[in-house]
Amino acid sequence: MDKIITVPFGYLLDFLYQLTSNYGVALMIFAVLVQAVMLPISMKSKKSMMKMTRLQPRINAIKEKYANDQQKQQEAIQQLQKEEGASMGCGGCLWSLVPLLILIPLYSVVRQPLTYLLHESPENIGKIIEVLRAQDPSMFTGGAFYDEIVAASNISQYKDVIQAAIPEISARTLEGINFSFVGINLGAQPQLGVFTAAAGWTWANIGAALIPLLSAGSQIVQTIITRRANDSLVTNEKGVQDKEAAKQSQSAKTSNIMMWMMPLLSLWIGFTVPVALSLYWFVGGICRTVEDILLTKRYRKIYDAEDAERLKKAMEQEAIEAEKERLRAEKRAANPDGISENTSKKKLQKQQQQAEDAAKAAAKKEYDAKKGVVVEEEPKKTTLSGISDRPYCKGRAYDPNRYTNTEES
């Protein structure tokens, strides 16, 4: 199955290398294009993650409410996720795993240039490595996993010997791949000893060591930016940002661990593999950081609008409940003995509706004031009869001079 991913992307990297005649530039463009291809998947992953993050305080409240009943707890959480359109179960995590499943085969494209750029057969690749190892065993010190990068960078030096051993080999393969990029050999393995006087202070050595350091540093920056964006998304049931819940959320604890574990792991790997892989990770990390910022901004607008609507409804409901309580208090104060009046149900419903409308209007006015929205008040409408409860009681035959004695006047 990995051939479905590696073969097309191998031809893409080969095309970019022939187009630019520079492996470093081709690899950087390749990393950008890979992120562009995976953008739809990244959008799905980001949207799902943001949705689950902002629901975390409400999920925590459900867990506290049904701490002793796991079945009700799961039912309530699933109902909440269904109402909010969030992925249930592991569905939200699935989109986060898909990019990783695609990236792993893509590393093969970078570390196996003889296979995917020069399109050599496994038999010829084995013979090339065998010939080069016989000529200089010291060049293969990074493990068999990266033999193709080492071989591709040294083929041109021993092309006569290789051609004699493999007569059918193509002329392009004998040229090998030029891994030189701004004075750095991307096919070489960086050395930690570069910072000692014995290693020699050359740009080739220093640059090769800086690339994995930059790759690890970019991951720390990416984690910090992502965490701050995620924390700002955590809101309560009213749609108000909940900073305390953000600090205590599982995602915050996970990001604390990942902030240092992943960059340190990347740094360790960077000094055990050819520089080309670290350059690929570095450029890809920058692309993912920019992508994360843009996607957060995009979906933030959508979720902020949802939170604003939730806050507005919560304020309206609070105002309605407050108005109901005020009316009940007035009624209790006016009728301490509890003597009920013979009031029609329709009239009571109308009074209640008028109270709710007034409460909603007050809540909207308060919400607009908080948001800085200036709303012009509409002029009060007057009824024909002057009686608000009976606006049309005059009727068609109403004559204001019916009982006036016109003869005397």
Image (cartoon, helix red, strand yellow):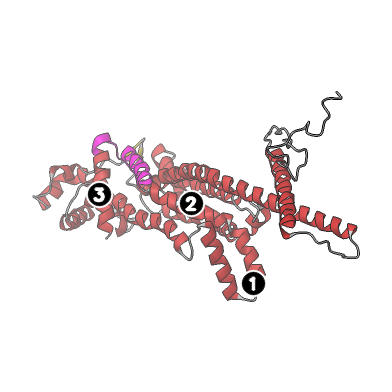
Which percent across, then down, holds residue 175?
Answer: 19, 41
Q: Tell me which secondary structure the magenta stretch mostly adopts.
A: helix
Crowd tier of the residue under label 3, counting other residues whose Cα lies within 10 Å: few below 14, some 14–19, many 20 or above: few
> What residue range appears in magenta?
18-37
Q: Can see residue 196?
A: no
Tell me which amino acid carries mark 3.
Answer: Pro
Q: Residue at x 41, y 38 (%)?
A: 202
> Which residue corresponds to mark 1?
66
Q: Secondary structure at mark 3?
A: helix
- Look at the numbered discs 2 and 1 and tell me whether their residues touch, using CB distance below 8 Å: no
Residue in the foreground of this view, choosing between 17 and 75: 75
> Which residue corresponds to mark 3?
8
Crowd tier of the residue under label 2, counting other residues whose Cα lies within 10 Å: few below 14, some 14–19, many 20 or above: many
Asked whether 25 falls inside the magenta stretch, the response is: yes
Distance, label 2 to label 1, CA atoms, is 28 Å
Q: Nearer the viewer, mark 2 or mark 3?
A: 2
Asked whether 335 falls inside the magenta stretch, the response is: no
> Which residue corresponds to mark 2?
47
Which percent across, then down, holds residue 16?
Answer: 27, 39
Which percent across, then down, holds residue 220?
Answer: 53, 49
